[in-house]
Image (cartoon, rainbow, N blue to C red):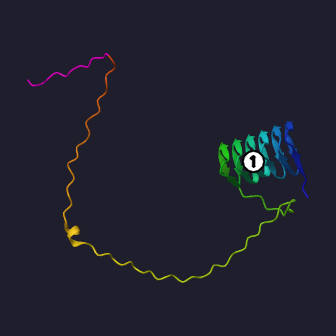
Amino acid sequence: MSQSSVIGAGTVVRGTLEGEGSLEVYGRVEGDVSMTGDVSVGEGGAILGDVTATKISVSGSVQGDLRGSEAVLLERGAKVIGDLSAPRVGIANGALVRGSVRTEGEPAPAQKRAPGPGLKPATFAAKPVAKTEPKPVIAPRAEPVEVAAAARPKEQAPERRPPPPVLPSLGKGAKGKKKKDRDE
């Protein structure tokens, strides 16, 4: 069973963090973070530095690059200034990213992890689809058309002219120059 460390709200850590297991950040970390497990930045949590982990989930703010060997997930309300790099990258509506996003490499082989407290493994079951026969299409009845109205010629629209040209206005007190007549 992997260990999980928590940096609580109101806690400020300055320096590089390296370790085995997972890390949850609800406070502030000023420095690079490198973990062998998952890193989760909760709402109100902030990291000023690069983050490297298996899976990175952000709901708070990060100012630095995020590199995940499996995935980088930005939840609603996340703010990241930096580059994202992982085989799988997920950005939810309402998450902000200023940087490049790169999906590269194959995800690390999945390790069987025991679900944590409150987590249940997802199960997906295919639902059978009932066959339905197509309904016959019935054409609507055509309405009788008044022949006299259909045979009338359409009234012609009056001839349309283009609008007059827009002339630049002169400033107050300025005099315009008249063009000389070339009748000669």
Residue shown at the point (34%, 20%) measured from the top left: 171
Foreground of the two, 145 or 184 = 145
Q: Residue at x 29, y 75 (%)?
A: 144
Q: In this view, does 35 lie to the left or right of 84?
A: right
Residue tagged by mark 1? 59
* Residue 176 visible in the snapshot: yes
User: In which image quadrant can residue 14 be found?
Assistant: top right
- Quadrant location of the N terminus? bottom right
Look at the image and tell me whether residue 104 can be seen.
Answer: no
Based on the displayed image, in which of its 4 quarters is residue 184 positioned?
top left
Magenta span dominant secondary structure = loop
Compare residues 121 and 168 and report the one nearer the observer: 168
SS state under label 1: loop
Location of residue 18 in the rendering, given as x and y in whole percent from the top left corner = 86, 44
12 sits to left or right of 171: right
- In the picture, measured across the screen, residue 107 lies left or right of residue 172, that is right
Residue 38: percent from the left, percent from the top? 82, 52
What span is colored magenta in the figure? 173-184
The quarter of the displayed image where residue 80 is located: top right
Inspect the magenta stretch and tell me whether residue 174 lies in it. yes
Q: Where is residue 175 drawn, in percent x and y?
A: 27, 17
